[in-house]
Image: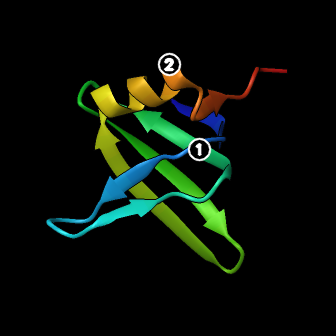
């Protein structure tokens, strides 16, 4: 199930062994599994997505860096 959310704080991911990359603030979609959460976003003309460990995702939720949109 895809959830609508907003990035409202510092959320980072890492590609391979590279440096941390910050996900820009704004709307996103999140798909959760037992092991990770995939965050997808649009950045003007491009799209991005990143999988982060579920523990990091839950930490970002608890801190308010990721805020789930309320269903209408």
Residue 66 screen position, x and y as percent: 57, 34
Of mark 2 and mark 1, the one earlier in the sequence is: 1
Q: Nearer the viewer, residue 52 or 11?
A: 11
Instruction: Judge from the rendering whether residue 21 lies leftward or rightward of residue 5; answer left or right.
Output: left
Separation of disc 2 and disc 1 at Cα? 17 Å
Between marks 2 and 1 in the image, the one whose residue lies nearer the viewer: 2
Q: Residues within 10 Å of mark 1 (few under 14, many from 20)?
A: some
Q: Residue at x 21, y 70 (%)?
A: 18
Q: Quadrant of the C terminus?
A: top right
Q: Residue furthest right?
A: 72
Q: Residues within 10 Å of mark 2 (few under 14, many from 20)?
A: few
Q: Residue furthest left?
A: 17
Q: Secondary structure at mark 1?
A: strand
Q: Nearer the viewer, residue 25 or 37?
A: 25
Q: Residue furthest bottom?
A: 45
Residue 36 against residue 34 in the figure, above or below: below
Q: Residue at x 59, y 58 (%)?
A: 41
Residue 68 figure quarter: top right
Q: Nearer the viewer, residue 33 or 53?
A: 53
Residue 42 figure quarter: bottom right
Please say if the residues under marks 2 and 1 sit with CB atoms less than 8 Å apart: no
Residue at image mark 2: 62
Residue 67 screen position, x and y as percent: 64, 29
Instruction: Judge from the rendering whether residue 69 lies leftward or rightward of residue 66; answer left or right.
Output: right
Q: How is the image coloured?
A: rainbow
Residue at image mark 1: 29
Residue 46 screen position, x and y as percent: 60, 77
Residue 64 screen position, x and y as percent: 59, 26
Instruction: Judge from the rendering whether residue 45 lies leftward or rightward of residue 9; answer left or right.
Output: right
Q: Secondary structure at mark 2?
A: helix
Instruction: Judge from the rendering whether residue 23 lies leftward or rightward of residue 18; answer left or right.
Output: right
Give the label on residue 60, or none.
Answer: none
């Amino acid at each position: 199930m895809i959830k609508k959310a907003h990035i409202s704080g510092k959320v980072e991911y890492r590609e391979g062994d590279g440096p941390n990359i910050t996900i820009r603030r704004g709307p996103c979609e999140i798909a959760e599994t037992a092991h990770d959460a995939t965050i997808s976003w649009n950045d003007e003309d491009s799209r991005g997505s990143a999988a982060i460990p579920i523990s990091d995702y839950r930490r970002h939720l608890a801190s308010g860096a990721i805020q789930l949109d309320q269903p209408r």
